[in-house]
Image (spheres, rainbow, N blue to C red):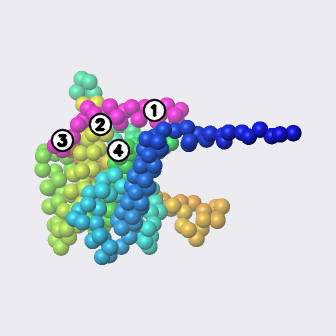
């Protein structure tokens, strides 16, 4: 019985126009080159500085990595990140008639903002604002002496020069700590402006003053990881006193309030 010859089956690739095949290959080559560049740039950025960085001319490497791909850790760091930061805010708010004032509950800005990163492949940069503020303030707090930390726990809010008065008081306690005190004052200024935004977004324009605290809680030590009864160490808290309100130039309170309140309300709805 004679067998009939069959025409070769056409494959999906053979059915594509030549120009489309060429376009697919060009896109694949470009994507491979971009991936190779990103891996190479990331390696140069997170590795200890060497002469290899000179392969990338000028500030091209920094311009590419910052702000979108910059990380707060290093592959070669002897101590990786091993704790959680929290930034909490409460406020003194006047009543509608202006006769009374009430202290609000604490609101965790980090819980609100980090909820924007949960289940999102490309989270917004705003998801890390609270962690950054807490880390910066807690780090500067740790640079103060115990006596200066006691001063930071006091209330400073009268007038427009309360930050200057706090700086003077700290330097009187330890004159040779100018760098540490200046760093703390700078971090307090930014933390206060951030806390003011949170307070006014949460409780409206009747906020009189704010109080904020930054804390760090370490994870269970590595050597205790298999201990079922192991507990996380107690939080280390940098607790300030009551502060006046600060608004920095170019702060957009309306945009901040819309985003923060939307995320805050969504978080509260999920936790009910």
Q: Nearer the viewer, mark 4 or mark 1?
A: 4
- Mark number, residue 126: 4
First in sequence: mark 2 or mark 1? Answer: 2
Give how far apart the Cα atoms at labels 2 and 3 are.
12 Å
Structural crowding at the residue carrying mark 2, measured as other residues with C-alpha within 10 Å and reported as few (<14), some (14–19) or many (≥20): some
Extreme residue in the bottom direction: 51
Secondary element type, mark 3:
loop
- Mark number, residue 256: 2
Nearer to us in this view, 52 or 74: 52
- Mark number, residue 101: none
Tell me which secondary structure the magenta stretch mostly adopts.
Answer: helix
Nearer to us in this view, 173 or 39: 39
First in sequence: mark 4 or mark 3? Answer: 4
- Mark number, residue 266: 1
Magenta residues (range):
248-272
Q: Nearer the viewer, mark 4 or mark 2?
A: 4
Quadrant where the image shows the N terminus: top right
First in sequence: mark 2 or mark 3? Answer: 3
Structural crowding at the residue carrying mark 3, measured as other residues with C-alpha within 10 Å and reported as few (<14), some (14–19) or many (≥20): few
Q: In this image, 217 relative to 11: left or right?
A: left
- Mark number, residue 250: 3
Q: Contact (CB < 8 A) between labels 4 and 1?
A: no
Q: Residue at x 17, y 68 (%)?
A: 178
Q: Residue at x 43, y 31 (%)?
A: 265
- Residue 236: where, in percent of width, then height? 41, 60
Give how far apart the Cα atoms at labels 2 and 1 are.
16 Å
First in sequence: mark 4 or mark 1? Answer: 4
């Amino acid at each position: 019985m004679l067998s009939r010859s069959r025409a070769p089956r056409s494959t999906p690739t053979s059915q594509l126009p030549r120009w489309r095949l060429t376009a697919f290959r060009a896109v694949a080559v470009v994507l491979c080159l971009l991936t190779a560049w990103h891996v190479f740039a990331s390696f140069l950025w997170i590795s200890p500085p060497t002469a290899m960085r000179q392969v990338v001319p000028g500030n091209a490497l920094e311009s590419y990595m910052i702000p979108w791909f910059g990380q707060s850790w290093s592959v070669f760091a002897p101590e990786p990140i091993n704790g959680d930061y929290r930034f909490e805010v409460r406020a003194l708010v006047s009543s509608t008639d202006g006769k009374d004032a009430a202290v609000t509950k604490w609101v965790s800005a980090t819980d609100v903002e980090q909820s924007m990163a949960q289940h999102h492949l490309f989270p917004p940069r705003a998801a890390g604002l609270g962690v950054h503020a807490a880390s910066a303030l807690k780090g500067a707090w740790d640079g103060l002496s115990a006596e200066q930390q006691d001063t930071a726990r006091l209330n400073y809010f009268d007038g427009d020069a309360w930050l200057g008065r706090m700086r003077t008081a700290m330097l009187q306690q330890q004159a040779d700590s100018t760098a540490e005190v200046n760093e703390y004052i700078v971090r307090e200024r930014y933390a206060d402006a951030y806390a003011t935004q949170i307070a006014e977004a949460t409780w409206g324009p009747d906020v009189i003053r704010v109080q904020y605290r930054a804390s760090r809680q370490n994870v269970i030590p590595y050597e205790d990881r298999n201990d079922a009864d192991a507990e996380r160490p107690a939080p280390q808290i940098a607790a300030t006193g009551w502060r006046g309100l600060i608004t920095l130039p170019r702060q957009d309170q309306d945009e901040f309030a819309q985003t923060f309140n939307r995320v805050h309300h969504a978080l509260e709805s999920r936790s009910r």
